[in-house]
Image (cartoon, rainbow, N blue to C red):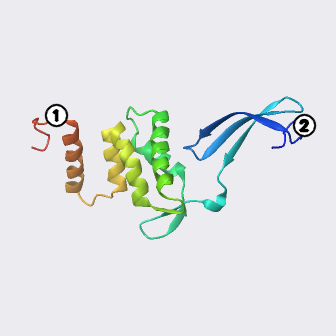
């Protein structure tokens, strides 16, 4: 790696860390000539880009920002921090990239996000699911809500829909 200060090509790696859901490696380096330190980032080249297959069978490049945006909308006025939203996206993304390398369906992406969100905030989960699953009527929404309520309540307790 060429030093940005003295332009020499002699350095050593001081520290390496994974970031951006394991897709980027951050390296701290020190130039052996001028002794200054600098940071480099390594990531997979664009040639291996992941595409998302939408419901209409069109393909669009995977975009983490779309996941974050959906989570922010679902978590609006909920006690879910921005850091927690990033963690949910990281875990969902790790699942996606562990299972797919070229193409992934929107169904798998949505399910991966919902699985993580359900553990964090049930109301935000219902909000996300209502958009993602595109419930056709109130009955489908009520069925999903009652499932979430049954998971949260102790056995033997009457539910809201009993």
Residue closest to the eye, 20 or 77? 20
Q: Circle 1 sits in a helix, a strand or a loop, which is it?
A: loop
Could you tell whether 19 is left or right of 118 in the image? right
Image coordinates of residue 140 in percent, x first then y, are 23, 56
Q: Is residue 98 left or right of residue 135?
A: right
Q: Position of residue 87 (x, y in %)?
A: 47, 38
Q: Could you tell me residue 119's position as x and y percent?
A: 34, 39
Q: Quadrant of the N terminus?
A: top right
Sort mark 2 into few (<14), some (14-19) or many (20+) by Cα contacts within 10 Å.
few
Counting other residues with Cα less than 10 Å from the Cα at mark 1, is it few (<14), some (14-19), or many (20 or more)?
few
Which residue corresponds to mark 1? 154
Kindly identify the residue that appears in the image at 86 percent across and 33 percent down: 32
Q: Is residue 42 left or right of residue 115?
A: right
Say if 140 sits above or below 17 in the image: below
Quadrant assignment, res 22? top right
Q: How many marks?
A: 2
The residue that mark 2 highlights is: 6
User: Residue drawn at (19%, 55%), measured in percent from left and top?
Assistant: 139
Q: Which mark is residue 11?
A: none
What is the C-alpha distance between the residues marked 1 and 2?
A: 66 Å
Helix, strand or loop at disc 2? loop
């Amino acid at each position: 790696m060429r030093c940005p200060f003295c332009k020499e090509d002699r350095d050593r790696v001081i520290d390496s860390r994974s970031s951006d859901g394991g897709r980027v490696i951050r390296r701290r380096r020190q130039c052996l000539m001028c002794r200054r330190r600098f940071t480099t980032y390594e990531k997979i080249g664009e040639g291996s880009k992941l595409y998302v297959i939408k419901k209409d069978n069109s393909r669009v490049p995977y975009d983490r920002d779309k996941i974050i945006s959906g989570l922010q909308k679902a978590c609006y006025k909920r006690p879910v921090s921005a850091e927690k939203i990033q963690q949910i996206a990281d875990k969902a993304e790790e699942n996606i990239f562990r299972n797919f390398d070229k193409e992934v369906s929107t169904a798998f992406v949505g399910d991966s996000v919902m699985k993580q969100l359900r553990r964090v905030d049930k109301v935000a989960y219902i909000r996300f699911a209502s958009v993602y699953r595109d419930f056709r009527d109130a009955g489908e929404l009520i069925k999903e809500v009652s499932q979430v309520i049954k998971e949260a309540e102790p056995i033997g307790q009457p539910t809201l829909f009993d």
